[in-house]
Image: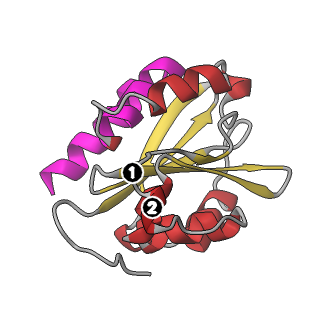
């Protein structure tokens, strides 16, 4: 899948998981950062304690979280309006059985999907909503905030820094 627009930085996907009780993070191939089905497959193949998740930052404009639970993909899209310009966001809305916003709905930035995706890790829907509603933050900053709140910031930030150097 390709983005409908190619301005600014591209998309990057980071796999986060626990191994023997320690948080680990690893970059996924760039091509997967634009492929929801590929992200689910990569996540399904990942060993670890209690399953992992993928954090995808798309051009610092929006992010997607993918997590498996009971063989089903749980997804969160930070901004539904991204579906107008980006295939990955459109694929997420399709997976959620939601429509792409109309022109008159593009004024309001709203998330879609599973706001409780990290409930079991101590980040409830209300706190997730607070992060997502901070419109002063770019998507990469929101993901960093989430990584800090969930306790895997060191591993995540190392991978993101390495990706930024590429």
Q: Position of residue 56 (x, y in %)?
A: 43, 53
Give the label on residue 90, or none: none
Residue closest to the eye, 106 or 123: 106
In-image side of 81 versus 140 (left or right): right
Q: Position of residue 32 (x, y in %)?
A: 46, 69
Q: Examine the image and state in which quarter residue 100 appears.
A: bottom right
In-image side of 27 versus 18 (left or right): left
Start and end of the magenta stretch? 140-166
Q: Examine the image and state in which quarter residue 49 appears.
A: top right
Q: What residue is drawn where x is 83% and y is 57%?
A: 71
Q: Are marks 2 and 1 in contact (CB under 8 Å)?
A: yes
Q: How busy is the neighbourhood of tag 1: few (under 14 within 10 Å), some, or many (20 plus)?
A: few
Q: Which residue is mark 2?
A: 104
Residue closest to the eye, 2 or 152: 2
C-alpha separation, residue under disc 2 versus residue under disc 1: 7 Å
Q: Position of residue 10 (x, y in %)?
A: 26, 64
In-image side of 82 versus 161 (left or right): right
Magenta segment's dominant SS is helix
Give the label on residue 107, or none: 1
In-image side of 90 versus 125 (left or right): left
Q: Examine the image and state in which quarter residue 135 appears.
A: top left
Element on which disc 2 rests: helix
Q: Is residue 164 above or below residue 3?
A: above
The colour scheme applied to this rendered structure is: secondary structure
Residue closest to the eye, 143 or 133: 133
Q: What residue is drawn where x is 50% and y is 55%?
A: 80
């Amino acid at each position: 899948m390709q983005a409908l627009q190619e301005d600014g930085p591209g998309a990057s996907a980071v796999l986060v998981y626990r191994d023997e009780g320690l948080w680990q993070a690893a970059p996924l191939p760039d091509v997967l950062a634009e492929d929801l089905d590929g992200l689910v497959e990569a996540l399904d193949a990942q060993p670890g304690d209690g399953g992992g998740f993928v954090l995808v930052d798309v051009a610092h404009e929006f992010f997607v979280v993918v997590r498996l639970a009971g063989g089903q993909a749980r997804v969160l899209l930070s901004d539904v309006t991204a579906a107008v310009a980006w295939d990955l966001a459109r694929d997420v809305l399709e997976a959620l059985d939601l429509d792409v916003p109309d022109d008159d709905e593009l004024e309001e930035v709203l998330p879609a999907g599973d706001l409780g995706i990290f409930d079991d890790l101590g980040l409830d829907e209300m706190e997730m909503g607070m992060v997502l509603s901070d419109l002063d933050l770019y998507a990469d900053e929101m993901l960093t905030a989430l990584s800090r709140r969930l306790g895997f910031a060191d591993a995540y930030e190392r991978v993101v820094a390495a990706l930024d150097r590429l």
